[in-house]
Image: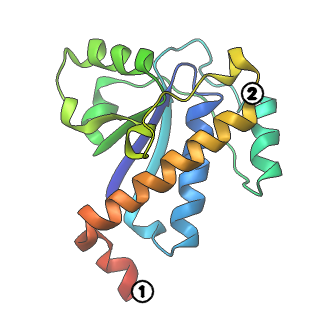
């Protein structure tokens, strides 16, 4: 089982979109049993909130359904996950502060796995939910390809069932 957590600021736009996109990708490939996928915010400002409606609409347009309640990430959440995928440099700095600089080997920017590493711009401010979705989808796809190459033995259960 590979534990993956996606992280943004409030856990109502980018990280829940990434969580649902990645869950969809693993299901489509028959790999869902090999993953535990979650998402968090670095702030508690949206704790308990649903996915922000424009982000939810963008998911629906792309045929992805799911529900979510915002949660703030804790040090225990960092410890319990194999990969923490943040959306931008601010999220990365927030996690490094939370962890005291520990666990850096498991914290990555989502789009660092793409051919064009970059931040996923926050659609709360840009209002461009489609662009954020495209960046997230590209990042999730590249991350999954990375895992399929680097951790192929972890997927043997799904191949047998």
As rendered, which of 76 and 134 lies closer to the eye? 134
How far apart in space, not on screen, are marks 1 and 2 (Cα)?
Answer: 40 Å
Label 1 sits on a secondary structure element that is loop
Q: Residues within 10 Å of mark 1 (few under 14, many from 20)?
A: few
Tell me what residue is drawn at x 25 percent, y 38 percent.
Answer: 106
Q: Secondary structure at mark 2?
A: loop
Q: Are marks 1 and 2 in contact (CB under 8 Å)?
A: no
User: Mark 2, residues whose alpha carbon is within 10 Å: few (<14), some, or many (≥20)?
Assistant: some
Task: Point out residue 45 in the picture as x, y percentages from the top left corner.
Answer: 59, 11
Total marks shown come to 2
For residue 110, above or below residue 2: above
Q: Which residue is label 2 attached to?
A: 128
User: In the image, which disc is placed on residue 161?
Assistant: 1
In the figure, is residue 8 to the left or right of 78? right
Q: Quadrant of the C terminus?
A: bottom left
Rendered location of residue 70, percent (x, y): 59, 28
Outermost front residue: 116
Could you tell which of marks 1 and 2 lies nearer the N-terminus?
2
Q: Position of residue 73 (x, y in %)?
A: 42, 25
Q: Quadrant of the N terminus?
A: bottom left
- Residue 40 in percent (x, y) is at 49, 30
Residue 72 in view here: yes
Nearer to us of marks 1 and 2 is: 2
| Residue drawn where x is 37% and y is 14% of the image | 94
Q: Identify the residue at horizontal 69%, vertical 35% (top origin).
A: 131
Q: Is residue 68 visible?
A: no
Residue in view at x 55 percent, y 45 percent: 19
- As displayed, is residue 94 above or below residue 104? above
């Amino acid at each position: 089982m590979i534990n993956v957590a996606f992280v943004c600021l409030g856990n109502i736009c980018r990280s829940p979109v990434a969580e649902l996109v990645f869950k969809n990708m693993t299901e489509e490939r028959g790999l869902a049993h090999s993953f535990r996928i979650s998402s968090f915010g670095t702030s508690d400002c949206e704790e308990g909130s649903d996915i922000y409606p424009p982000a939810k609409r963008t998911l629906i347009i792309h045929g992805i359904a799911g529900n979510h309640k915002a949660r703030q990430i804790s040090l225990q959440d960092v410890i319990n996950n194999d990969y923490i995928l943040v959306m931008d440099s601010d999220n990365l700095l927030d996690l490094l502060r939370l962890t005291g600089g520990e666990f850096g080997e498991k914290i990555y920017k989502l789009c660092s796995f793409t051919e064009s590493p970059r931040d996923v711009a926050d659609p709360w401010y840009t209002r461009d939910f489609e662009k954020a979705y495209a960046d997230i989808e590209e990042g999730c796809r590249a991350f999954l390809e990375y895992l399929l190459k680097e951790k192929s033995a972890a997927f043997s259960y799904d191949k047998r069932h």
